[in-house]
Image (cartoon, grey):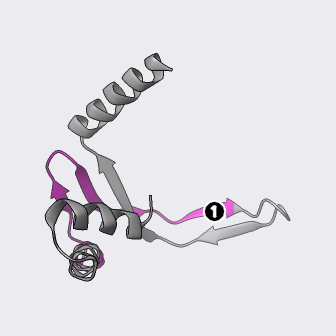
Amino acid sequence: MTKADIVDVIAAATGLTKVETEAVVDGFISTVIDAMKAGKNIEIRGFGSFKVKKRKGRMARNPRTGEQVKVEEHFVPIFKVSKDLKHVVDENLKKTAGQS
């Protein structure tokens, strides 16, 4: 599913135009990005949480050449799915898999 597909579904469900819906979706995405850039965590109950995790520096290996490479300390965005969403997805896919 693409962002355009999400906009179409939300627009149909809310009665908003696609342009208005796209502005809302873009606003949500940019708000999440801005918060993560500031090092903040975002929690959406029943969906999941977006966090920023610090990775330690380490020595790695270039798989092509075998050369040792130093990887500096860095921060990575993480998304952790809520237990509720995990359960709903699992149950629904079990049902649909059992019907085929």
Q: Position of residue 85 (x, y in %)?
A: 26, 39
Mark 1 Cα-neighbour bin, 10 Å: few <14, some 14–19, many ≥20:
few
Q: Is residue 23 above or below residue 57?
A: below
- Which residue lies most toward the top here? 98
Tell me if 68 is positioned left or right of 64 in this view.
Answer: left
Residue 56 is a magenta residue: yes
In magenta segment, residue 57: yes
Is 53 on the left or on the right of 64, as rendered? left
Residue 17 can be seen, yes or no: yes
Image coordinates for residue 39, horizontal then vertical, percent: 25, 73
Q: Which residues are magenta?
A: 31-60
Q: Please tell me whether mark 1 sits on a helix, a strand or a loop.
A: strand
Q: Residue at x 22, y 79 (%)?
A: 27
**Relative image position of residue 66 (x, y in whole percent):** 82, 61
Residue topped by disc 1 = 59
* Camera-side residue of 76 and 95: 95
Is residue 1 left or right of 70 when viewed as pictured?
Answer: left
